[in-house]
Image: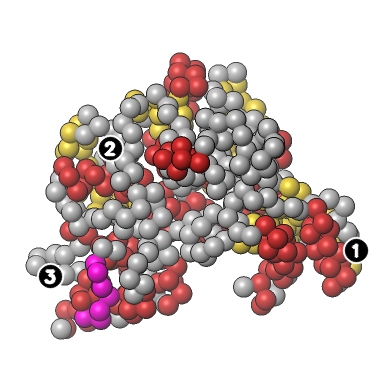
Amino acid sequence: MKIQFELNGAPTAVEATPMARLLDVLREDLRLTGTKEGCGEGECGACTVLIDGRAINSCLVPVVQVRGAKVQTVEGLARDGRLHPVQQAFVDHGGAQCGICTPGFVVAAAELLARDPQPDAITIREALAGNLCRCTGYQKIIDSVARTLSGDEEAAR
Amino acid sequence: MLRIADTFVVERPRTVAAALALLDAHGDKARLVAGGTDILVNIKHGLHAPEVLVDLKAIDGLRVVDLEGDVFELGALVAIHDLARHPGVQAALPSLARAAGLIAGPQLRRMGTLGGNICLDTRCVYINQTHFWRDALGYCIKKDGTVCHVTKVGKKCVAAASNDTAPVLWTLGASVRLASPRGVRELALEDFYVNDGEKNTVLAPDEILTHVRVPRPAPTRRMAYQKLRVRDSIDYPMLNLALAFDLDGGVVSNLDVVVSAVAARPRRVKRLPEGPLSAALIDEAAALAHKQVRPLTNINGDVAWRREMVPVLLRRAFAEALGEEAAA
């Protein structure tokens, strides 16, 4: 079945079976391996991507459900050779350890920052509650999100 | 890797009528999917093997949140996240908004739907496992087997109702609207659930839950929801409790307590007291709840501890309903 959707801002079409997981279509058919598989049953958030601006677990989304939707993966966050501010914050403040959970955290954090540019600590923890870090590096992840620079600050760097 | 077995056809009807026609044509070989957060995991674990999956997400009109009339109307496809964050729901039905906000984690709340939570399959430590795991232990009544590993001797499945919204909607006097080729029927939520873990609702194979209807609560109505789980950020309940009562001039009446994640059907605590709000009244209600609710070893969490937490959740719920600091 031919399935068309918008991927990181560009129109995309893939030939896939309707129940193929969006996760597998992204990683194997479209070669976007930034999105990771952890548990495969919706608990760990490693496979988080945005569908129409909302963070979801791509291991539980049959690709047929994204027909006509806007999908954004971690690869779509950097613009014009510059990291997304939250990616830069993870680099600056040690938000990543082994790295397998990082794309999911970054995407979930990017969704949060898009709707709430200056979230308080509780809001950050709530927004990242669906993402597990097996290195247990949560504090630095939360610090990285809290210290993500606003657009103006970023421009002044 | 838990891929989805790709052995079935997916249909995406645009209307309820078209979805009903598909169910009518395929009978029990068809299953419904909306958010997919429950059924897709269960398909991955080999609990269902449908030939046709009817995806409801393309149907318009089932995302309504109408809080205007004397009876509120909530569409079955309203996302759990939207229910939790809806200012009108937060104001008029705070216990429902709170329960929705405590379902699973953020990603799953954006995927899951109100109708899906009401129709959530029952859960048990012996069933929510991979096929390999279940095969190794020996199957059970709910799927492929003849014994119950929880009760050992029982012939009835005791998997637990694990919906967060069900006990709350029960205390709110909600009903569900069910569409089928025979027409539309409306059932009190309390009549929608039955005490059988194999299938704990009366939803027929050719029926679709389209709306939830909730009577506008009286201004005197107070309500609360409390949940016990392993990880506060994501898990299903090990025990949950919804509370509602009228408070008028310091007097409590129509006190209603529904406890779930215990048996296949939520359980209403009986013979609850009425009268002036006092520590004694709350003590009496807590003692009755403790006496009447007996958790089983069907889900995670020590049974004795879960039972001791029943009165604790009830006290917390009173504090929450009364707006006391201790509620948190």
Q: Residue furthest top?
A: B25
The amino acid on which the numbered mark 1 sits, given as a three-letter code, is Gly
The amino acid on which the numbered mark 3 sits, given as a three-letter code, is Arg
Q: Residue furthest right?
A: B275
Whether residue B195 is situated above or below residue B28 in the rendered picture: below
**Left or right, residue A25 beside residue B122:** left
Q: Quarter holding the C terminus of chain A?
A: bottom left
State the CA–CA distance, disc 2 to disc 1. 58 Å
Q: Nearer the viewer, residue B47 or A104?
A: B47
- SS category of the residue bearing label 3: loop
Which secondary structure class fits the magenta region best? loop
Which contiguous range is marked in magenta?
Answer: A92-99
Same chain under badges 2 and 1? The reply is no
Mark whose residue sits in front, 2 or 3: 2
Coordinates of residue B22 in the picture (x, y in percent): 44, 21
**Left or right, residue A72 beside residue A41:** left
Q: Earlier in the sequence, mark 2 or mark 3?
A: 2
State the residue position of label 2: A20
State the residue position of label 1: B275
Which residue is depicted at the point 40% across and 33% down?
A: B55
State the residue position of label 3: A82
Residue B253: in magenta span: no
Q: Residues within 10 Å of mark 1 (few under 14, many from 20)?
A: few
The chain carrying label 3 is A
Residue A93: in magenta span: yes
